[in-house]
Amino acid sequence: MDKKKYKEIVDRNTPKENYVKNAIIAFLVGGALGSLSELLLRCYSLWFELPRKESGVLVVLTLILISSILTACGVFDTLVTKVKAALIIPITGFAHSMTSAALEYKNEGLVLGIGSNIFKLAGTVILYGVVSVYIFGILRLIVTGG
Amino acid sequence: MTYVYAFLFCGLVCMIAQLILDNTKLTPGHVTSIFVVIGAALDIFGLYDKIVLYAGAGALIPITSFGHLLIHGAMDTASTLGPLGLAFGIFELTSAGISLAIFAAFVLALILKPRH
């Protein structure tokens, strides 16, 4: 069998990810999450009489707490396989990566396990965030002078 | 109207991420890192602030807002302290999120067992 034929057979038999359907699911679930957060933000600013900025922080904290608990209960991973990026891209994915890393390496001890692995996935977010902010910040200081 | 914009913006960000994940070999780690950098880049001249004005929490939830908050805190302090302010203020606005995520992850890892 030549390589071309082999490739044809492989192509035919690899399951095709239906990326249009995945994208629509991600759009709908992600959008719903955004609208719900806006609702929560308004509730918080009404209940606690906070300005929008502070209630925005509270909304983010609520999502972090919920997704950490769902991750620890094992629910989050099943949800992610269903709605894909809609839960990875919001701040929920950040909390999920930390809690799952902490749980996964728990057996290796408190310091060498949890301590050194908790930022395994979330670390890239912080690293590239900080590096890019330093570069962009210095650029902006040079351009605008302050 | 904010609800509609929140839906559209958050949904659009998630959809773009999903398309990247499905059509390239990048992992979720790559995509979130790219999005943080994009969020910071959009806020160099305050563009992301305008998105937050229209989309409200819909713009605060995606990971792009992490980059936005980092540069926002850094530039706020830099305007009073000068270039040193970059280092002082960079985590000012995100410290609540990061510290709660660390604390919650640690406590939950202590009391619960991993499930696979």
Image (tube, coloured by chain):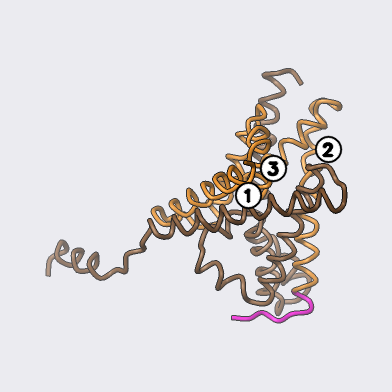
Chain colours: A brown, B orange
Label 3, residues with CA under 10 Å away: few <14, some 14-19, many ≥20: many
**In this picture, residue B12 sits left or right of residue B42:** left
Q: Chain of mark 2?
A: B
Q: Which residue is mark 2?
A: B88
Q: Which residue is mark 3?
A: A130
Instruction: Give, as a three-letter code, the residue at label 3.
Output: Val
Who's the residue at 61% across and 40% down the image?
Answer: B39
Compared to residue B45, the image places residue B40 above or below, namely: below
The quadrant in which residue B112 appears is: bottom right
Who's the residue at 63% across and 51% down the image?
Answer: A35
Give, as a single range, the part of the protein colored magenta.
B109-116
Instruction: Give, as a three-letter code, the residue at label 2.
Output: Phe
The numbered mark at residue B33 is none
In the rendered image, the residue lying farthest to the left is A1
Residue B61 is situated, as x and y percent measured from the top left of the image, at 66, 50
Instruction: Give, as a three-letter code, the residue at label 1.
Output: Ile
